[in-house]
Image (spheres, rainbow, N blue to C red):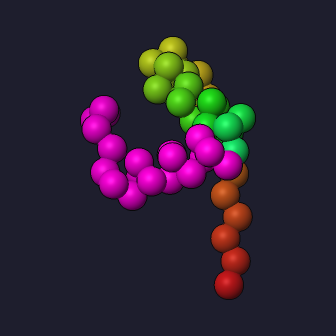
Amino acid sequence: MSKELNSVEQSRRNYLKEQKPRVYEKVMKFSEKIARNESIAIIQFQYN
């Protein structure tokens, strides 16, 4: 997995860091969880 983020992803993370710090903390732990084969289950709802 690449460690470098594109500008869009970096912008999204900056937004989370400023507006939703608890979510940001969880996102930053994803790599560690993946390395330990832990779940990072995500539910995403999309509607039209």
Residue 17 belongs to the span the image colors magenta? yes
Q: Main secondary structure of the magenta part?
A: helix
- Identify whether 5 is placed above or below 2: below
Q: How many marks?
A: 0
Q: Is residue 41 visible?
A: no
**Residue 2 lies in what quarter of the image?**
top left
Residue 44 pos. (x, y %)? 67, 58
Residue in view at x 67 percent, y 37 percent: 21
Farthest residue in the bottom direction? 48
Magenta residues (range): 1-19
Where is 10 relative to 23, above or below?
A: below
In the visual, does 8 lie left or right of 43?
left
Outermost front residue: 18
Q: 6 left or right of 15?
A: left
Q: Is residue 12 left or right of residue 39?
A: left
Position of 13 with respect to 46 (left or right) is: left
Q: Please state, as top left, top right, bottom left or bottom right, where the C terminus lies in the image.
A: bottom right
Asked if one can make out residue 25 in the rendered structure from this viewpoint, the answer is yes
| Residue visible at 71% across and 35% down in the picture | 22
Q: Position of residue 3 (x, y in %)?
A: 30, 32
Question: Was residue 48 drawn as part of the magenta stretch in this picture?
Answer: no
Location of residue 45 (image quadrant):
bottom right
Q: Quadrant of the N terminus?
A: top left
> Foreground residue, 39 or 7?
7
